Amino acid sequence: MDSKQPPPYNTIQQPQPQPGYIPAQTYQPYPSGPTQPPLYPPMPQPPPAQPPQTVIIQTTTTSNLTPIGSGPTRIRCPSCHADVVTTVKSTPSGRTHCWALILCLFVCWPCVCLPYCMDSCQNADHSCPNCGSYIGTFEN
Ligand SMILES: [Zn+2]
């Protein structure tokens, strides 16, 4: 019986020197640093497109923009929004007094009352006969 001796385990498991794992250099196409991608200047934001809107400005103020004349004028009352014929009240203006002074000095004093009797020499205050609101003054 020739029993073979099993080969003695004499092979000492020497720790194989692990080959130093040298990690492959990670390929960096763009080395971080000065070569940053160029920063584009911020584009100015375009104004948001606004839908066309019609702005209706209604002026309710009683201004002289109201097309009124020296006489009763058919107008839409800005207060009661009714088509009315304005009531005209003549009031003496500075021009009326001026005319009166001129007449008194250069013509004759009884004529002083003349400008106050002439509507063309006075301002015409228009008011609404419906609601009585003041509409405007026509200055002669
Ligand atoms: Zn009115």
Image: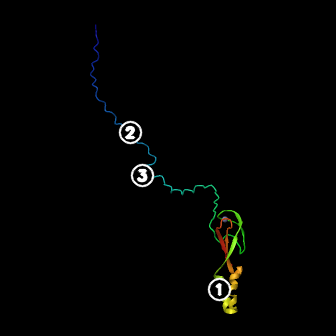
Q: Which residue is mark 2?
A: 23
Distance of mark 1 from mark 3, alpha carbons? Answer: 89 Å
On whether ligand 1 comes within 8 Å of the CB at mark 2, the answer is no
In primary-sequence order, the first of circles 1 and 2 is: 2
At label 3, counting other C-alpha atoms closer than 10 Å, the crowd grade (few under 14, some 14-19, many 20 or more) is few
Percent of width and height locating residue 13? 28, 26
Percent of width and height locating residue 57? 63, 62
Percent of width and height locating residue 113? 68, 85
At label 2, counting other C-alpha atoms closer than 10 Å, the crowd grade (few under 14, some 14-19, many 20 or more) is few
Tell me which corner region of the image, top left, top right, bottom left or bottom right, holds residue 80.
bottom right
Q: Is residue 15 left or right of residue 114?
A: left
The amino acid beneath tag 2 is: Pro
At label 1, counting other C-alpha atoms closer than 10 Å, the crowd grade (few under 14, some 14-19, many 20 or more) is some
Percent of width and height locating residue 7? 29, 17
Residue at 68% in and 82% down? 116
Q: Is residue 4 above or below residue 104?
A: above
Q: Which residue is mark 1?
A: 98
Q: Which is more toward the observer, 102 or 114?
A: 114
Q: Nearer the viewer, mark 2 or mark 3?
A: 3
Q: Which is more toward the observer, 67 or 82?
A: 82
In primary-sequence order, the first of circles 1 and 3 is: 3
Ligand 1 shows up in the quarter that is bottom right
